[in-house]
Image (cartoon, grey):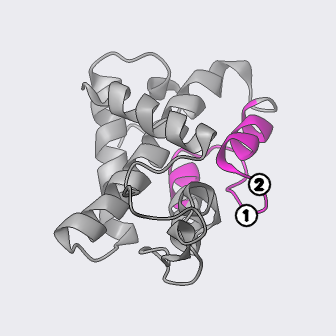
Amino acid sequence: MQHHYFCNAMLYSVKTKWCASETRDQRPETRDQRPCILCCREPETLDHLLVGCVFARTIWYEVLSWCRLTAHPPDGTLGFFEWLTTQIHPSPSALRKGFTLLAILTAWSIWKHRNAGIFDGLQPSTARLLTTIQDEARDWAAAGVKGPQAIIPVT
């Protein structure tokens, strides 16, 4: 349950456009030329990884559908924080905290799934990642974290 420190660090990286996996010898003009490991279509940037990648957009759609939230999944036209802001404000106030926590959990889980692919050779799997997110969200709710109980299905 100590994941929130890592989540905050990852989200800070997104906000400041810094990628923790960059090495010192990567020059700014070439560091984003590596293709996204999740979709193999576009250069990997943090915004692409979290909201632009077709893999990530599929995960967002499935997670939001699972919770029956009316928020629209990202379509890749906005960065992560811009998308999140446009979806939080129209949400009913009783659901905002749960939605925000779920968004942080989903972004963090996508990041960890990407790292498992790079460092452990794990093949990307939307089914496996969705199950991981659902299990973690249920664990948060069971631990008494305020917010998720309002949006997570009982089953």
View extreme (left): residue = 120
Q: CA gap, disc 2 to disc 1?
A: 7 Å
Count of picture labels: 2
Instruction: Please report the residue visible at 54 percent of the width from the left and 27 percent of the height from the top.
Output: 98
- 81 relative to 34, above or below: above
Q: Position of residue 127 (x, y in %)?
A: 35, 68
List the residue tagged with mark 2.
78
Q: Quadrant of residue 91?
A: top right
Give left or right: position of 3 versus 147.
left
Q: Position of residue 16 (x, y in %)?
A: 60, 39
Instruction: Please report the residue visible at 44 percent of the width from the left and 64 percent of the height from the top.
Output: 26
Amino acid type, label 1? Asp
* Front residue of this view, candidates 76 and 58: 76
In magenta segment, residue 72: yes
Q: If the image is split into quadrants, where does the N terminus sit?
A: top left
Instruction: Please report the residue visible at 77 percent of the width from the left and 54 percent of the height from the top.
Output: 78
Q: Quadrant of residue 130?
A: bottom left
Give left or right: position of 88 versus 5.
right
Residue 75, which numbered label?
Answer: 1
* Label 2 with label 1: CB-CB less than 8 Å: yes
Q: Position of residue 136 (x, y in %)?
A: 30, 40
